[in-house]
Image: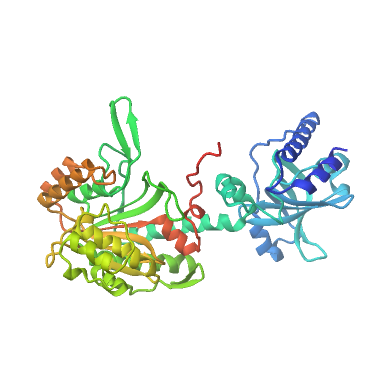
Amino acid sequence: MLDEKYTKTVNKADNENYQPEELNELMRIRREKLAELRDRGIEPYGSRFERTYMASRILANFEDIENKKVIISGRIMSKRGMGKATFAHIQDSTGQIQVYARLNNLGVQAYEVFSKLDIGDIIGVTGNVFKTRMGEVTVAVEEYKLLSKSLRPLPEKWHGLKDVETRYRQRYVDLIVNPEVKEVFVLRSKIIRSIRSFLDNRAFLEVETPMMHSIAGGAAARPFITYHNTLDMNLYLRIAPELYLKRLIVGGFEKVYEINRNFRNEGISTKHNPEFTMIELYQAYADYNDMMNLTEELISTVSLEVFGSAQIKYQGTDINLAPKWARLPMIEAVKIYSGLDFSKIKTADEAKDAVKAAKIDLDLATSDTWGSVLNKVFEETVEPKLIQPTFIMDYPVEISPLAKRKIENPELTYRFELFIYGREMANAFSELNDPVDQKSRFLKQVEKRKTGDEEAHMMDEDYINALEYGMPPTGGLGIGIDRLVMLLTDSPSIRDVILFPAMRPRD
């Protein structure tokens, strides 16, 4: 009677759209089954289980394993009864395989319990491998063990878990029912492993730097603030590891990198998550040209190693990651795409007048320098059009407080950003190693903070102190891991490549 009622209910409601009362009924029925199992003396939450084969290995090597005994385990993903026999598919981390349970093989009591197992239950199975008349590789169940009773129904297989918000909030369910989602995160791991291998093979040293800072530095961003009780002081969650990594260059390490978690108290979008992953690296005696060469070699190598090609498709667009990539000064890019020639514009007021005359719709109320206006025009008119990999070079000094000035034009810096599909993917400098110039720029940033710019840099006296000991000419590079994974896995949103993205509470 219990099974019949369950079957009627689940056929009606076993998908992500079931109403609370239906869900409650399904869960009540499953809890009744849980109690029944315990009444029978069956422990519904088993202990360690040792298996001999994974599903994919059996499927790939059937000829060698046919008629051999295997021990497998996994989650029941489908189940259909045929009187005295039941077919089910169980899923482990490598895929799904069919199992076949018969009353004659298991006996009345064991088969009765098996027939009452639910989709979502996790079991271990021992049995011989064979092929059904339909040609499907199957394990004939000789014995089984319940390892975990599922008390919540999975989404129905034909509809799956499709609601985007629910997928992000309940990633554990998303991973169970949407295999392509799990594959993205397997690829993410391979991408990071390939990055490490690339740098390790080039004598870079992986290091770790603090994630709580007394001064928020290394990037223009609003920090998260926390409080340390023992020290009786505010601390900032790391917005970038840059200043600590460059201290290591001062200390004599010549090639360092860190795959790091950063935290920026900013908006959430398809391209932004307040907690994100970056790779930052620094190389002594190098400059931003070396960083451009390294960047295109690194990304193309990762694509080749993980995906077998430097030619990828992102959201229907073909992207060629094979070197050499386009290199374009920012002033020249703005001239090409907007018609404005900032090499002939000298002040912020002139720049604003030129933007207005060109009828470019921009809010320039907070842009008080020539360089900030140039950057705003670039972001509006150029950035969305940079589809193929392009290095935009020579950023204004006003928006590049940690980059070395260009000798031939001190209003610009040896800085580049990499754009692919209209998105910033990397940021790099010939690092500023002049302590006097660095302190002067920090002081200008402090003034900006006093006028309300919460993203301006803070003064870091200890970093200035480090530079005064002498830092060799250095190239530095930061690449957003999340955005790189988005690109390489053809994922439209950053939330698709972060296992547990930031979400507003439901209540």
Left or right: where 478 falls relative to 19: left
Rendering coords of residue 28 (x, y %): 75, 34
Q: Quadrant of the image for the N terminus?
A: top right
**174 and 109: which is toward the camera:** 174
Q: Is residue 328 visible?
A: no
Q: Does 258 appear above or below 39?
A: below
Q: Does 492 appear above or below 4?
A: below
Rendering coords of residue 503 (x, y %): 50, 44
Q: How is the image coloured?
A: rainbow
> Image quarter for residue 477?
bottom left
Rendering coords of residue 103 (x, y %): 87, 47
Left or right: where 390 falls relative to 254: right
Q: Is residue 63 visible?
A: yes
Q: Residue at x 51, y 54 (%)?
A: 496
Q: Does 359 appear above or below 21?
A: below
> Image quarter for residue 200?
bottom left
Q: How many marks?
A: 0
**79 and 97: which is toward the camera:** 79
Q: Quadrant of the image for the C terminus?
A: top right
Rendering coords of residue 314 (x, y %): 48, 67
Q: Residue at x 15, y 60 (%)?
A: 405
**79 and 206: which is toward the camera:** 79
